[in-house]
Amino acid sequence: MIRQRPLVVLRSFLRTPSGFSDDPRGFAINQGGHAGVGMLLAWALGMWWPVAIGYAVWEVIQWRRFGGQDWDGLQDWSFVVIGAFAAANLWLLVPMAGYLMAGYLRRADGA
């Protein structure tokens, strides 16, 4: 097996949208990662709104150019933004955890 360079793998990953419709664990890891990205970017920039705007632009690109689903893009964006908000108030992770668990259970139940 040929080992790919990390940037090639990352680029491929970013261009492959996935809603994890039938994968509860994948959904939870994916959305937890989105929240983490939002939090880290907001901490680095010192504000949440550039994260929200920048990620919205990225999700529209994924949706229109790479065949992403509109609902998946909105869900990804929501987790990024709640993560960005949580950079200033960690208590916001509590309702985010509830939303994350609801998505997990929906997929686990096969609904």
Image (cartoon, helix red, strand yellow):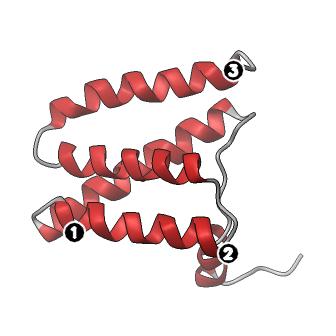
The amino acid type of the residue labelled 1 equals Pro
- Mark seen at residue 108: 3
Mark 1 vs 2, N-terminal side = 2
Real-space Cα distance between discs 3 and 1?
A: 34 Å
Crowding near the residue tagged with mark 1, few <14, some 14–19, many ≥20 C-alpha atoms within 10 Å: some
46 relative to 56 in the view: left or right: left
Q: CA distance from mark 3 to mark 2?
A: 27 Å
In the figure, residue 95 lies in which quadrant? top left
Secondary structure of the residue carrying numbered label 1: helix
Q: Secondary structure at mark 3?
A: helix
Distance of mark 1 from mark 2, alpha carbons? 24 Å
Nearer to us: label 3 or label 1: 1
For disc 2, the marked residue is: 12
- Residue 96 picture location, percent across and down: 34, 31
Among all residues in the image, which is located at the extreme right? 1
The residue under the point 71% across, 19% down is 111
